Every structure is written in C-alpha cells, then in structure tokens.
Image (spheres, rainbow, N blue to C red):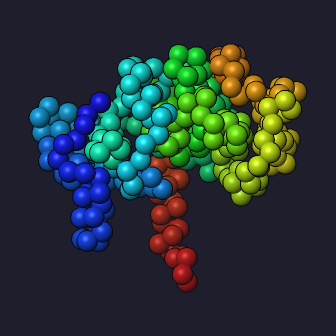
C-alpha cells in the first residue's frame, strides 16, 4: 500500500476547484504519464497511465473525493492474486484517506448487453464468473461486491470477465450498513436484470426493513418474473433463491454451487467482441444521422 507524502487530499481538491478541472494523474504522482482517459463515473476518473519508473502500463482510478472504506482497505491488503477476474490493487493515500488506486493494465473489451442478439451463454458467463468471484472473496477474505452491474465488467480475449470498478462497491460481509439494507441480495438481483438491460433501481427502491429470515425482497421484483418467463436458466435461479431465506446471499457455498453450474467463459469471445464493435458503430452512425436534439 502506497502512502502519498506529496500533498494532502484537501490540497489536491482545492487546486482542482480553483482551476476548474479534474484531478490529473500527475497530481497523484509525477511519475504517472497519462496515455488515455478510459472513463469516468460517480466515484472518479479512470486513466491509462505509464509508470515512468517501471515502464509498466497501469489503470489509475482517481477518486472525486477522498474517502475511507474498510472493504477497499481489506481488499488491497489481502487480495494478492488475479484469480476469478480480479486484480491486485495498490492504494494511494494521504492524511489517512484514499485518493486513488491502480492495478496492472491488460487489454480488455466491453460487451454490450443491450443487444437482444447476444446469446444467453454470454450472459451466463458473466453471472457464473461473478459467482465464483464472490465465493472467493467471501470465503477467503470476508469481502463481497455489491455493485455487479454489466458496466463494471470487461472481457478478456479468452472469454473471461474481469471486475474493474474497485471502490465503494467492495464491502466486508460484516459491514453493518451493508447488512441492514441487504446490499448483497440487491446486487445479485441487479446483476440478473442488468444482463438483460433492465435497471433494478428504476424498478424497485431500497427497503428500510430488510429481513434475513425470509426470501430476499429484491429478488421478488416483478421485472425478474418478466425475464424468467423468457429464460429458463433465470427461472431456475429464482426458484432457488425465492425458496431460501435472504441469508443465502451471505453464504459462499451458494455462489460456488451456482457459479460452477453455469458457463464461466464466453463461447467464441472474438465473435462477441467484433459484434459489439459493429453494433456500437451502427449506434454512432444512427446518432449522427438523427441527433437527439432534432
């Protein structure tokens, strides 16, 4: 774990506000040479950088706001392998707060789950990979992921999905706030819907009286019934989770059994990559031909 002694988080963010810009990789460490902005979201900006000291390419996530979160600290301290589509991360901290993290870069590809032509074996591969990842994190490190939406995964050219959104979505299985709101059960329902381009947040709000002695209320969502009516494998999964108490989502064995029963890698990954590229090309052409503001 790396402790930054250059500037406090307060100084970095003060500079950002004064100049009216986002934090750059060089604000975190001058040895980071930015190569590309990979994306940005609620938590921060993602960059592809080169470390001038080692010559290695890294994925650097710079957070909008400094924070502390036990799940991220435990993950960085304990997870030292790249099994199950995970990465070993290194934190940059200042004044006891996390301001950035990085992990080794590897070529990964987006998969567009919005297209109906995407075969179910691809959707199964993401669910299967997530379940094995969750089993590993829970059984070995007392951790779990609560935000397994499709946009938080990319695919390698061997067909394996990799988790990429390291941050507030990493939680310990004993975190009181996470348990009180049933975030692990919520995340599972979120994944089953997101692979069919449905947003659980638009279908169902968080509940204040989440209970573990009955089936998970989030997995009783009506949108899941609509998906299950068209896809037998989803129907089988729902049949199990709805017959069990919500505590099932804290049980590593559940994730192992389900993960090993599903595809864990995409069949014909290069075909999926090229199809996604082609569909995205068509979307760009359509948007140029018919701009939204016309």
Q: Is residue 133 left or right of residue 219?
A: left
Q: Quadrant of residue 108?
A: top left
Which quadrant, please, contains the N terminus? top left
Between 233 and 34, which is closer to the camera in this rendering?
Answer: 34
Between 56 and 293, which is closer to the camera in this rendering?
Answer: 56
Residue that protrudes farthest toward the left in the picture: 53
Between 23 and 82, which is closer to the camera in this rendering?
Answer: 23
Visible residue check, residue 216:
yes
Q: Position of residue 112 (x, y in %)?
A: 55, 47
Which quadrant, please, contains the C terminus? bottom right
Q: Position of residue 78 (x, y in %)?
A: 41, 21
Visible residue check, residue 261:
no
Between 105 and 173, which is closer to the camera in this rendering?
Answer: 173
Which residue corresponds to the image point at 24% horizontal and 71% vertical from the top-left? 19
Q: Position of residue 243 (x, y in %)?
A: 88, 27
Number of disc labels: 0
Residue that protrudes farthest toward the bottom in the picture: 294
Placement of 164 over or under 197, stated as above or below: above
Q: Is residue 108 left or right of residue 3?
A: right
Q: Quadrant of residue 219?
A: top right
Which residue corresponds to the image point at 70% horizontal and 40% vertical from the top-left? 180
Q: Quadrant of residue 256?
A: top right
Q: Position of residue 100 (x, y in %)?
A: 33, 44
Which residue corresponds to the image point at 53% horizontal and 41% vertical from the top-left? 169
């Amino acid at each position: 774990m790396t402790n930054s002694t250059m500037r406090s988080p307060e100084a970095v963010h003060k500079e950002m506000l004064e100049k009216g810009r986002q934090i750059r990789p060089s604000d975190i460490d001058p040895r980071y040479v930015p190569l590309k902005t990979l994306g940005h979201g609620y938590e921060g900006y993602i960059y592809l950088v080169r470390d001038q000291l080692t010559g290695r390419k890294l994925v650097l996530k710079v957070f909008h706001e400094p924070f502390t979160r036990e799940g991220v600290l435990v993950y960085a301290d304990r997870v030292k392998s790249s099994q199950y589509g995970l990465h070993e991360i290194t934190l940059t901290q200042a004044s006891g707060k996390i301001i950035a993290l990085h992990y080794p870069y590897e070529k990964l590809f987006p998969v567009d789950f919005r297209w109906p032509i995407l075969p179910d074996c691809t959707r199964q591969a993401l669910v299967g990979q997530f379940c094995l990842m969750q089993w590993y994190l829970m059984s070995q490190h007392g951790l779990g992921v609560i935000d397994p939406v499709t946009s938080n995964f990319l695919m390698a050219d061997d067909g394996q999905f990799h988790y990429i959104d390291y941050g507030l979505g990493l939680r310990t299985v004993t975190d009181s706030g996470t348990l009180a709101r049933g975030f692990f059960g919520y995340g599972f329902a979120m994944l089953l819907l997101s692979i069919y381009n449905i947003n659980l947040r638009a279908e169902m709000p968080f509940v204040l009286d989440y209970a573990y002695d009955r089936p998970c209320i989030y997995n009783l969502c009506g949108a899941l019934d609509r998906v299950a009516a068209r896809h037998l494998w989803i129907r089988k999964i729902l049949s199990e989770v709805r017959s069990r108490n919500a505590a099932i989502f804290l049980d590593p064995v559940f994730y192992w059994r389900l993960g090993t029963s599903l595809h864990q890698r995409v069949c014909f990954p290069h075909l999926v990559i090229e199809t996604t590229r082609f569909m995205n090309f068509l979307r760009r052409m359509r948007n140029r031909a018919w701009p939204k503001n016309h």
